Amino acid sequence: MKTIIEKPLLAVSGIDRLRMGIDGKGVRTLVVTAGCPLRCKYCLNPHSWNGRAFLGSFSAEQLYDRVKIDNLYFLTTNGGITFGGGEPLMQPDFIHNFCRKYAMWSVNIETSLNCPWEYVEKIAEDIDEWYIDIKDMNSEIYRAYTGSDNRAVTENLQRLIKLVPPERICIRVPLIKGFNGESDVEDSVRRLRELGFVRFDRFEYKA
Ligand code: SF4
């Protein structure tokens, strides 16, 4: 079993303020974390794959200082922070500590869920809404598109649904031109429904 490396700082490659209707309720700030284990063919952030923190590395207090300008918007709209990436689940200790320290804000996550289960478990109770991009449930399609195995994704989905109410989990099921088709998307949704998931976001990746 892999151990979680203590990381007091969050490697950040971007911050995007005043988002609405994209990654959760209310007015939100997206914190784009650096580093990702996948290599998706249509990735929009390949510059951050290696974990290089273009914006810098932040302590919880430094990140709070950076995003608190929108505190009133967050509180009046039930909004808050969304951690995306890159893969934010590669830095679970930071997210856990941040959520405990600044519990007045809603915190969401956008993730591929392709990581060790203990990373997911660490923040399972801290996150208000999960946005999980599963790419495709078919392991061959997944490997062709991401260069990685999806066993951890499937296992983490099975465990997460036992910890978190399904209404708080949105599964993104993309149509990926050149890699899957409508029938593959249908098959993924069917398999996810069998696992207990009820919220789906179907859309098309643009190459
Ligand atoms: S999971 Fe996201 S950040 Fe990582 S390679 Fe795929 S698209 Fe890029």
Image: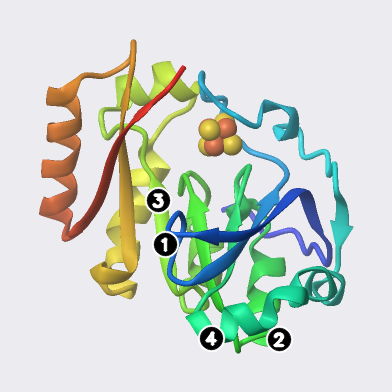
Measure the alpha-carbon separation of dots 1 and 4: 21 Å
Count of labels shown? 4
Q: Give the side of residue 170 with respect to residue 64, left or right.
A: left
Circles 4 and 3: CB atoms closer than 8 Å = no
Q: Residue furthest top?
A: 178
Element marked by disc 4: helix
Rendered residue at 68%/85% (across/down): 102
> Which of pointers 2 and 4 indicates the residue nearer the eye?
4
Where residue 76 is drawn, which disc sits there? 4
The yes-or-no answer for disc 1 within 8 Å of ligand 1 is no
Q: Give the side of residue 172 with respect to residue 197, left or right.
A: right
Count neighbours of disc 2 (C-alpha within 10 A) and say few if under 14, some if 14 to 19, many if 20 or more. few
Sequence-wise first label, 2 or 1? 2
Sequence-wise first label, 2 or 4? 4
| Label 2 sits on residue | 101
Amino acid type for the residue under numbered disc 3: Ile
